Amino acid sequence: KLLKGAVAGAAGIALLLGGAGTFALWNDAATVSGGTIATGTLSIAKTGTATWTDISPTVASGTTFNPATQALVPGDKVQLKQSVVVSTTGKNLKAEFTFNPASITTNAALAGLLDYTLVATPVVATGSATVASSGVNTYTITPGSAATTTVDVTFTVEFKDTTTGTTAQNIAAAANLTGLSFTLTQVRP
């Protein structure tokens, strides 16, 4: 009987101790006006029509180039000009602007004979973003107070004049730029 009583007493104490955590203790809360958080933007879109110009050393300034009807020879240099609008808003936002080399298909016979270069220049307006060269064919864009900035992009294709003999002649699709892609990628400051 004593054993039964001790077991029952121990069970009762265990139940009481197990429920001890449910006693309410004082607590309180305060609401603060934290505001609403928004996210920024990072996007790029072309604007206007792309134009080609022949800037070869022996050609008159402003001469147009038509890739559909004209062929390059060693020493030629042509430029594609396209404006893009970049949307860059947000605290601590910086973005890297460049082109995607994989978006250009170059015929294997011209490997190493064509050079591609990119120049990006912002159209300066009140609050426009800053665009600074940060490496070969790469620019860092830092937002200004305006949500969008127009950037004039000049993409140059040069057929090296060091090409000799009959190398890379009569190639209809020497370089396919129909899918040329400019990219804008966030980088941490």
Image (cartoon, rainbow, N blue to C red):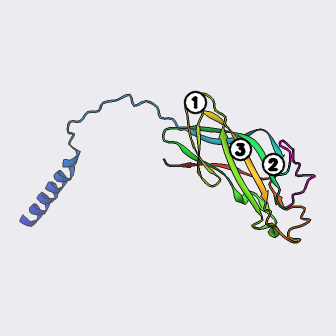
Say left or right for 137 vs 53.
Answer: left
Magenta stretch: includes residue 109: no
Say left or right for 151 vs 1.
Answer: right
Three-letter amino acid code of the residue under disc 2 = Ile
Three-letter amino acid code of the residue under disc 3 = Val
Say left or right for 17 vs 112.
Answer: left
Q: How far apart are marks 2 and 3 (CA)?
A: 15 Å
User: Horizontal and vertical percent for residue 1?
Assistant: 8, 65
User: Horizontal and vertical percent for residue 75?
Assistant: 82, 59
Q: Main secondary structure of the magenta part?
A: loop
Three-letter amino acid code of the residue under disc 1 = Gly
Instruction: Count neighbours of disc 1 (C-alpha within 10 A) and say few if under 14, some if 14 to 19, many if 20 or more.
Output: few
Q: Nearer the viewer, residue 123 or 99?
A: 123
User: Horizontal and vertical percent for residue 154?
Assistant: 73, 46
Say left or right for 34 vs 127.
Answer: left
Instruction: Count neighbours of disc 3 (C-alpha within 10 A) and say few if under 14, some if 14 to 19, many if 20 or more.
Output: many
Label disc, if present, on residue 153 of the rendered structure: 3
Question: What is the span of residues highlighted in magenta in the rendered image?
Answer: 59-73
Q: Which residue is drawn at 79% across and 66% down?
A: 162
Contact check, label 1 and label 2, Cβ < 8 Å: no
Q: Residue at x 21, y 39 (%)?
A: 24
SS state under label 3? strand
Q: In which quarter of the image is residue 6?
A: bottom left
SS state under label 2? loop
Q: How far apart are marks 1 and 3 (CA)?
A: 19 Å
Q: Distance between the residues labelled 1 and 2?
A: 33 Å
Q: Mark 2 points at which residue?
A: 55
SS state under label 1? loop
Label disc, if present, on residue 39 of the rendered structure: none
Magenta stretch: includes residue 66: yes
Q: Which of marks 2 and 3 is nearer the N terminus?
A: 2
Label disc, if present, on residue 127 of the rendered structure: 1
